Structures are given as C-alpha cells and as structure tokens.
Amino acid sequence: MPQPEHFDVVVFGSGQGGQLIAWHLARAGRRAALVERRLIAGSCPMIACMPSKNEVWGARVAHLARHGAQFGVVTSSVTTDMATVLRRKRDMVSHEVDLHLQNFRATGTELIMGNGHLVAPKTLEVRLNDGGTRVLAGDQIFLNLGTHPAIPAISDLEAARPLTHIEALELDYAPAHLIVLGGGYVGLEMAQAYRRFGSRVTVIEPGPRVISREDADVSDEIQRILSDEGVQLVTAAETRGVRGRSGEQVSVTVRTPSGEQQIEGSDILVATGRVPNTAGIGLEEAGVELDARGYIRVNERLETTASNVWAIGECAGSPHFTHVSVDDFRIIRDNLAGGSRTTQDRIVPYCLFTDPPLAHVGLTERDAESQGIAVRVARLSVSTVLRTHTTDETRGFMKALIGGDDRILGFTMIGAEAGEVMTVVQTAMLAGLPYQRLRDAVIAHLTMAEGLGPLLGNLPPR
C-alpha cells in the first residue's frame, strides 16, 4: 500500500453538501481533497434532480403543443424527437459539470477520481480511475456517499435488465409501453413525462394508493390527474414475476384483489426506493457505525461514531433532497466555527414535479392525528384563484393546517407554481406568524399566491 498523503480535509463523495464543505474549507486555507468514483457534482445535476426536471419540462412543452388549439394556437400533428430531448439534457449536464470543475479550480480543492475504501480510521485508499492507487489520511473526514436505486427481489426482474431513473433519462426513444414499478415520487414524474412523450404507461403500486405518504385527498387528486392523461394506475398490486427483457418485450405478473393478471409492455422502469451506498467500503475499519437500515449513524450535529468524521446527506439518513444536503453542510460549517446548530426541528419542504406539481411543508393531516395535535384545516380549490382563469390550470387544491395558537403547522398544494406558493407559507412558518398575518397580507394580483388569502379565510371556526 502506498505511503499515506496527509490532508486537512478529505471528502468521500461529491454530492452537493460534500462539495460545499470541501470548497468552504479549502477557501479557508485548508488542504482539501474530494474523492469521487464517477459523478462529478454528484447525482443531482448529473443523473437525478436536474436531468429529470429537464425532461419533465420537455414533456410539458409537448403536452402544451398538443393542446394548443384551446388557446387558439393551431398546429399540425405533434411528434417528439427523443434524440433532441436527450441532447438538450446532456448539454445541460455538461454545463453543470463545467461550473463545478471551475469551483474545484478556484478553491484549490483537489478532485480525485477513483473508487474509495476506508482502510483505517480517517484513512482512505483510492483506486484511481486512470490507474494506480493513492492513500489519503485526513484530519477531518466527511462522508457524502449518497444512495442508489433499490431493485426489489422479484422473480427474474434483474434478468430483465430493468431501467432505473438513470437509464430512463438516457433513452433516445419513447417506449411503446413503459411499465413502472412503484407509484412514488420518481415513478410518477417519469410516468407522466413518458406518457406526454407518446408512450403508453402503466404504473404498478403495491400499496392501496400512489404516493401513500401523503394524505388520501392528495394522492387521490394526483391519481385523477394522471389517469385523465391516460396513465394506467394499478394499485394494491403485488408483482409476482417478470419475463422478457426491457427494451424489447416484457411481461409482468401481478396479483391484485380482483385476481392475477399479466401486463405486457416494451420497457420496465424500477422506482421502488433507494439504498445507501455504505456497504463494502470499509466503514467498520474506520469506526463508523450503521443503523439497522444501513444508513450511517449520526447525532443531531451529523457527527458519526468515529471522532472527526461527519456524514452528509442521504447516507446519513437525512431526507433525500438536495436542499437538505445543503442544509447539512451549513450545520457542519457553522458548528466547525463554534456554533451549535442541529438537524432537530428543521422545516423541510419538498415538491413532486408532476404537472401540476405537488408541494408540501410541515405536518400532514395524518401526521397531526398520529401525534395527537389538534388542528383546523382550511381548503381551497385552485380553480377559484383568478390566475387560473387566465391559464386554464384549474386542477388541484390548497390545504393549510392551523394549530391552537393560530400558527401554520402544515401546507400542501397541488397546482401551478405550487413550490413557489409553498415557500411563501414556509416563510410565515419560520417567522412563527399567526395565520391571520398571511390571510390579511396584500398579495400581488394576478398570482397563484393570491389564493392564500381566500384559503386562510376558509378556516373553520374554533
């Protein structure tokens, strides 16, 4: 084994939070190295968040083109050139990688491309992609390992060479019939996008409804929207086996309450959850413990069980969002400077980028019930928001949960610009404002956020 090279800071994995901590400490004069196997900038800009939203937007353009006549825009038949869709996505990814490489150069952070393995406390052996081996010893180690798609143990599924979101975003064709295993957030975004690109799409969900973590009215509305676009949703369905090969011909056997059926398709996409990238990389050699699910065990300051070793993002069991990884970085950064920030009680928003999108922050009704928190619930159809009268984007609703002290405890919206409207509510929640302050605010006309006034005006009396 080569002689160890000493660094002040070694970051294992180049997700958003890991890069930020490496760049920050390098700017402060620390000698910093970041080890990445393949994805410069991590999965978000390379194979996940940004590429998927790039193609989702392309699918929305195709959908609008097909429905242009209702706005007085008459076109001939609309087809999708998937090679152009793919090229546009790749151009965006290439641009993002260039921006990240500029930051490595500007900060003086050394980017080391290779497969890392912890061989001792705070010591990482790297088998370089271009040959050779380096051993890095760091005073401080930051683990930013991420996750990968889970492939469920279904008979002959692996032999069918199924797509994950990674391969689905590299297709240069629209599948004749895409079968999606999993009615969660990734599965539904991809299902709607490929339906709009021209594919027939069937989603198989083992639970009684899609996006089952949401309240029933939310998942029901999303299901109605997708069904109206022609996405077939098969719920309460146990996948028993798969035959064939994705990209050619596949047959999926499912068992439903109404009996067993065969679903024939051309391609199959697995979107059934994610697994942390923590196995087989020597964490035990470094004194880093895992929890029962394979995530790195951390405290509320994101410190692992090993001294001067932190974990960031999904591998630490943090919510699987890039914006949470960024906040993990901020917590660690501030604590290294003498602060006392923690992951406890942070308000984490999220969006599902279907069209219309779903946005949520805070408690759901189910959360409130399970925690014994009494709330009043205000609801408003987005069709009553005057902005939608100009755009015809009338599907969806807003919902707010108000606590006994009149503060907003949760907000959900399905509708155009839902993420932007949610951020307004999140700001009020962070400020601890009573709902009346937002209800009575002067909000610009015509905006979707203008609906917050009538929504909160709909709150039932105590």
Image: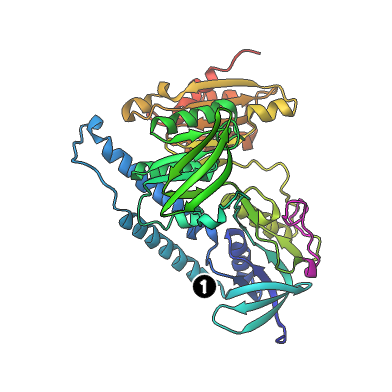
**Residue 135 belongs to the span the image colors magenta:** no
Residue 302: x and y in percent read: 73, 56
Q: Can residue 400 be seen here?
A: yes
Q: In the rendered view of the protein, which quadrant contains the C terminus? A: top right
Task: State the residue at coordinates (76%, 72%).
Answer: 122
Identify the residue at image location x=60%, y=29%.
215
Quadrant (top left, top right, bottom left, bottom right) of the N terminus: bottom right
* Residue 175 at x, y percent in the picture: 38, 49
Q: Is residue 367 above or below residue 343?
A: above
Question: From the viewer's perspective, is residue 283 above or below residue 302?
Answer: below
User: 451 and 418: which one is in front?
Assistant: 418
Residue 337 showing in the rendered view: no
* Residue type at tag 1: Ala
Magenta segment boundaries in residue numbering: 284-304
Magenta-drawn stretch, dominant element (helix, strand or loop): loop
* Residue at figure coordinates x 51%, y 40% from the top left: 352
Residue 301 belongs to the span the image colors magenta:
yes
**Quadrant location of residue 125?**
bottom right
* Residue at 44% in and 25% down: 382
The residue under label 1 is 106
Residue 151 screen position, x and y as percent: 59, 52
Task: Specify the quadrant of the image occupied by residue 347.
Answer: top right
Could you tell me how many numbered marks the image carries?
Answer: 1
